[in-house]
Amino acid sequence: MANVEHLNKLRKGSLNWSEWLHRCQIKADLQDANLSGITLEKVFLAKANLKRANLTNAELNEANLTNANLQQAELIDANLAGANLSNADLRSAYLIDADFSQANLIGADLRAISGRCVNFSDSNLIGTSIAGAALHQANFSEAQLHRTSFSEADLTEANFNQADLSYANLYEAELQQASFYQANLYRVKAIAAHLSKSYLFAANLTEITAVGCDLRWTNLSYANLRNANLRGANLRGANLTRADLKGADLTGANLRGVNLTKTDLRRANLTRANIQQTIFAKAVLQGTIMPDGTKHY
């Protein structure tokens, strides 16, 4: 339960709260507190215990929540735009329509969070773990996701347009119908990830490791897939028009019905790949290893 004195002080407003905290030099104990609808713009809650707190419709924009404990907190329609949540613990928090736009979440723990339509646009999530999360229709557009882990997360219909996911971990992530327009996925680990019907137009997937990845019916036109590891990937029906696949490893991949019109496949490896009904119109095949093991000249 929350400390009654702390709760009463907080409800008097962020200015009085900050002055009191500074004077007493204590950590706020607000566990299980009902803070629904509270307005605390720029409030200082660093290292606060907000475990299982109800923050529905709370106004916490630009709040300082560094190292705060928000495990299992309820953040329905909460406004945390521009907040500092670096190294905060949000494990198993419940988020619906929450706003984390432009927030600092470096090093935060978001494992097993759940909800939908959460806004992380233009936020900093470098080094963050979102493994095992269930966040349908989340917005990560233009977010910093360098080295972020989405391992086994369900991010169906998420928006990653123009986000930086370089070196991110997408192992077995559910990303069906997600959008990655012009996103940076350089050296991403997407082993056994599910990306069917996703939009990857003009995305940078250079040196991606996507062994066994489900890429059926994806739009990868104009994408950069140089030196990508796509061994055993399922690309059935995908659109790779004008994509760059130079040096890509497509050994054993399913390319049935794939559109490779004007695609650059120089030095790509198609050994044992399924190319039934594949369209190679004006594709560049110089040095390409074909499914039967012969090299195209």
Image (spheres, rainbow, N blue to C red):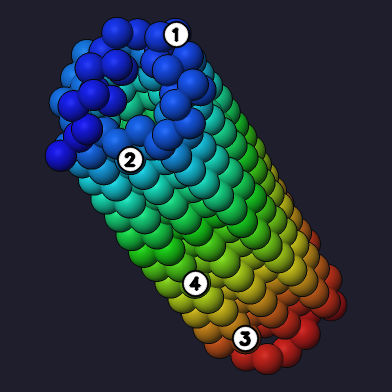
Evaluate if marks 3 and 4 touch, with contact meaning CB atoms under 8 Å apart. Answer: no
Spatial CA span between label 3 and label 4? 19 Å
Spatial CA span between label 4 and label 2? 37 Å
User: Between tags 3 and 2, which lies in front?
Assistant: 2
Q: Earlier in the sequence, mark 3 or mark 4?
A: 4
Residue 271's tag is 3
The answer to which of 183 and 152 lies nearer the viewer is 152
Look at label 1 and name its amino acid.
Leu
Spatial CA span between label 4 and label 1? 49 Å
Counting from the top left corner in percent of width and height, residue 121 is at 50, 28
Look at label 2 and name its amino acid.
Asn
Look at label 3 and name its amino acid.
Thr
Q: State whether residue 24 is above or below residue 73.
A: above
User: On the rendered structure, is 78 left or right of 54?
Assistant: right
Counting from the top left corner in percent of width and height, residue 160 is at 51, 39
Q: Which of marks 3 and 2 is nearer the N terminus?
A: 2
Circle 4 sits on which residue?
191
Q: Earlier in the sequence, mark 4 or mark 1?
A: 1
Q: Quadrant of the N terminus?
A: top left
* Residue appearing at x 48%, y 31% in the figure: 25
User: On the rendered structure, is 32 left or right of 269?
Assistant: left
Spatial CA span between label 1 and label 3? 67 Å
Circle 2 sits on which residue?
49
User: Between tags 4 and 2, which lies in front?
Assistant: 2
Q: Quadrant of the C terminus?
A: bottom right
* Residue appearing at x 68%, y 91% in the figure: 293
Look at label 4 and name its amino acid.
Ile
* Residue appearing at x 33%, y 59% in the figure: 132
